[in-house]
Image (cartoon, rainbow, N blue to C red):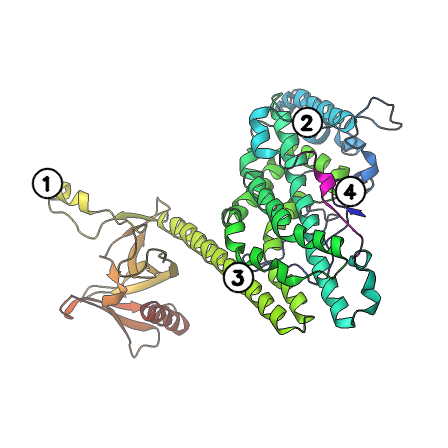
């Protein structure tokens, strides 16, 4: 019988490779990379020979002597540790030496964890971080479905392939639960125990792993209520695994796995926070290296673990499609198609939420670059005082005439020269948003640009190309469809003019 408790496992393998839909880019990196997996670490490069798993003892409790084991075996090579191990070299009175006591205490604590096991968390932390404590032995499964089906030799080739695909769905689910529990039982528990003695208190465990327990509980229930009963039925009857028995569970996929919305919304910030801590916090970097080499981690890098939920949730449609491909019965195919539709609908919902979150972040970044609203020159202090309450441009306010979930987006920006009336040309900087065009003037002594013309709402803006291939006319209309103002916009090139006209038209068509 194959156990999915504390045993080590290699990289995830199967009929279907992991897919990332929500986040572009390849997140999985080699554990042998100098960059430290997902992150480009700036610390000293460790000797790969010192990263072997056997350099550590397990979490086995006991006081027996361990040959060849000494505290903090992951220290840097000799030339690096003269003034405090991984803290780097420095003069005798370097401020870095103030961290040496903490570094030594960290060494001692981690050595104790290796020798005698991880202390259990206090009651106030157990409720959140401990899931299924002591029941890892329940996460066991046979090496092959053939052990459960005595008549597998008489089954058709296609049905055998269907059973292989279903078996991968079951085994990878248990493997994934085990990988999630590395984050809670090893990394989070280790940090919380260290923080109880005043170490690494500056690291936020909630920021790194706060939503992971919710994911584990969701998958635990999914196993107990959906996948587990199907496996137990086959164990009892000796009949092949039945895909139809999974239908009710997968049709409720979005309700079961709601915690993934929050996790996927925060994963970019989480990984950036972990990267920052590893780059700038030597003690945290040492702790992570200890965890990554511990036997419970299965050589998983921190970055790999943080991206696992994203990879798993997007893999379910592929796993189900692999079963569908080898299923000839019409009724079973209909059930599988319904399951795939339910899962893909939830993934689209996550994608939509993530896009909205990213659009909101981009809008916040753009508004921080736009400063004062100075479209008029007051003729007196009294006039200026009365205009002041109406001289604030709030780009974070909802767009008019569209659903609330649509967020204002920055579509295009760039320097141009404008000419209004008989005045000379003026160097300005344009911001084209989903619903408005802003004319701003960069400020020499500030990072923000001030708005120097009233906003041009796109629904009232008409743009016409001029004979000059680099220029176009921007006409702003009133509610009576009469001209309110007009600007001749001179772009740096004909290509730039085409880009401004195209982007403006696309925004208006939307």
Q: Residue at the spot x=78%, y=72% of the render?
A: 156
Residue 301, position as x, y percentages in the image: 69, 44
Magenta stretch in the rendered image: 132-144
Q: Residue at the spot x=75%, y=43% of the render?
A: 298
- The residue pinned by badge 2 equals 90
| Mark 2 touches mark 3? (CB < 8 Å) | no
- The residue pinned by badge 1 equals 382
Query: How much space separates mark 2 and mark 3, taking CA atoms?
Result: 59 Å
Majority SS type along the magenta span: loop
| Residue reaching furthest to the front | 237
| Mark 4, other Cα within 10 Å: few <14 / some 14–19 / many ≥20 | few
- Quarter of the rendering containing residue 85: top right
The earlier-in-sequence mark between 2 and 1 is: 2
Q: Nearer the viewer, residue 375 or 271?
A: 271
Q: Is residue 451 left or right of residue 150?
A: left
Q: Is residue 33 above or below residue 418?
A: above
| Mark 3, other Cα within 10 Å: few <14 / some 14–19 / many ≥20 | some
């Amino acid at each position: 019988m194959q156990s999915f408790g504390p045993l080590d496992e290699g990289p995830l393998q199967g009929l279907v490779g992991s897919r990332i839909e929500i986040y572009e880019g390849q997140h999985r990196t080699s554990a042998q990379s100098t960059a430290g997996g997902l992150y480009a670490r700036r610390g000293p490069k460790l000797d790969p020979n010192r990263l072997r798993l056997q350099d550590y003892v397990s979490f086995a409790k006991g006081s027996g002597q361990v040959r060849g084991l000494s505290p903090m075996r992951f220290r840097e090579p000799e030339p690096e540790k003269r003034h405090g191990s991984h803290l780097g070299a420095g003069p005798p009175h370097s401020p870095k030496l103030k961290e040496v006591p903490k570094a030594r205490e960290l060494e001692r604590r981690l050595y104790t964890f290796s020798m005698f096991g991880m202390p259990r968390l206090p009651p106030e932390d157990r409720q959140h971080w401990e899931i299924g404590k002591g029941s890892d032995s329940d996460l066991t499964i046979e090496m092959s479905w053939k052990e459960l089906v005595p008549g597998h030799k008489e089954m058709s080739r296609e049905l055998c392939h269907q059973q292989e695909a279903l078996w991968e769905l079951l085994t990878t689910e248990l493997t994934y639960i085990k990988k999630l529990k590395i984050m809670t039982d090893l990394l989070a528990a280790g940090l919380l125990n260290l923080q109880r003695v005043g170490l690494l208190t500056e690291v936020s465990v909630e920021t790194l792993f706060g939503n992971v327990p919710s994911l584990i509980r969701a998958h635990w229930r999914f196993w107990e209520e959906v996948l587990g009963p199907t496996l137990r039925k086959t164990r009892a009857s000796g009949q092949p695994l039945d895909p139809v028995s999974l239908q009710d569970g997968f049709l409720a996929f979005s309700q079961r796995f709601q915690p993934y919305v929050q996790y996927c919304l925060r994963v970019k910030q989480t990984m950036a926070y972990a990267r920052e801590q590893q780059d700038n916090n030597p003690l945290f970097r040492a702790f992570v290296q200890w965890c990554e080499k511990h036997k419970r981690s299965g050589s998983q890098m921190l970055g790999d673990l943080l991206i696992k939920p994203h990879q798993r949730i997007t893999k379910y449609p592929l796993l189900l499609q692999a079963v569908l491909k080898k299923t000839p019965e019409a009724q079973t195919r209909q059930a599988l198609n319904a399951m795939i539709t339910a899962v893909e609908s939830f993934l689209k919902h996550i994608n939509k939420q993530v896009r909205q979150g990213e659009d909101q972040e981009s809008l916040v970044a753009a508004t921080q670059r736009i400063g004062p609203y100075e479209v008029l020159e007051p003729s007196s202090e009294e006039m200026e005082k009365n205009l002041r309450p109406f001289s604030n441009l709030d780009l974070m306010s909802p767009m008019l005439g569209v659903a609330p979930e649509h967020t204002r987006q920055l579509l295009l920006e760039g320097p141009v020269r404008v000419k209004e009336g008989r005045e000379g040309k003026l160097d300005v900087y344009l911001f084209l948003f989903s619903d408005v065009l802003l004319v701003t003037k960069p400020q020499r002594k500030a990072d923000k640009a001030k708005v120097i013309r009233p906003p041009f709402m796109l629904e009232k803006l008409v743009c016409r190309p001029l004979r000059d291939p680099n220029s176009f006319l921007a006409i702003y209309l009133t509610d009576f469809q009469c001209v309110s103002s007009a600007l001749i916009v001179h772009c740096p090139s004909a290509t730039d003019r085409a880009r401004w006209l195209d982007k403006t038209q696309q925004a208006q068509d939307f």
